[in-house]
């Protein structure tokens, strides 16, 4: 995907296009782009939060999981609890 195509997806997502948001979440997840996922999550995408939790859990990124849990993600809190139990 070119930068222009990505910019167009971001523009469409910002104007409420759910399909564009879904595509951005998928692409950001594939790239491991935490910044894009955080931006999408802040804009209200629960799918972006889910992908952030998944990626942070895979990486053992406790800071990110704590941030997500503090923002209200029960899934992040659950992953944190699982990681604490395994240590």
Image (spheres, rainbow, N blue to C red):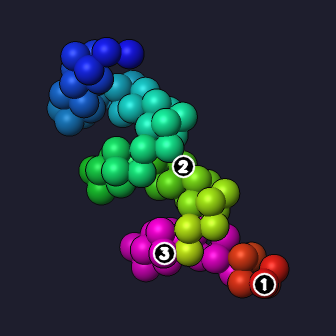
**Is disc 1 placed on a helix, strand or loop?**
loop
Q: Is residue 79 left or right of residue 48?
A: right
Residue 44: which numbered mark, if any? none
Q: Is residue 4 left or right of residue 64?
A: left
Tell me which numbered mark, 3 or 1, is placed earlier along the sequence: 3
Residue farthest toward the right in the current orientation of the protein: 86
- Residue hosting label 2: 51
In this rendering, the answer to whether 78 lies above or below 13 is below
Residue 72 shows in this picture: no
- Look at 22% across and 16% down and name the residue there: 4
* Residue 12 is inside the magenta segment: no
Q: What secondary structure do most residues of the magenta stretch adopt?
A: helix
- Residue hosting label 1: 87
**Is disc 2 placed on a helix, strand or loop?**
helix
| Classed neighbour count for the residue bearing mark 1: other residues with Cα under 10 Å, few (<14), some (14–19), many (≥20) | few
- Contact? badges 2 and 1 (CB < 8 Å): no
- Look at 57% across and 60% down and name the residue there: 56
- Residue 72, horizontal then vertical, whole percent: 45, 73
Range of residues picked out in magenta: 63-81
Front disc: 2 or 1: 1
């Amino acid at each position: 995907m070119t930068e222009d195509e990505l910019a167009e997806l971001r523009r469409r997502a910002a104007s409420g296009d759910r399909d564009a948001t879904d595509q951005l979440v998928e692409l950001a997840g594939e790239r491991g782009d935490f910044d894009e996922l955080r931006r999408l999550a802040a804009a209200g995408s629960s799918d972006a939060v889910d992908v952030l939790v998944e990626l942070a859990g895979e990486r053992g990124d406790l800071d990110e999981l704590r941030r997500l849990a503090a923002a209200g993600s029960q899934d992040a809190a659950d992953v944190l609890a699982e990681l604490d139990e395994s240590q």
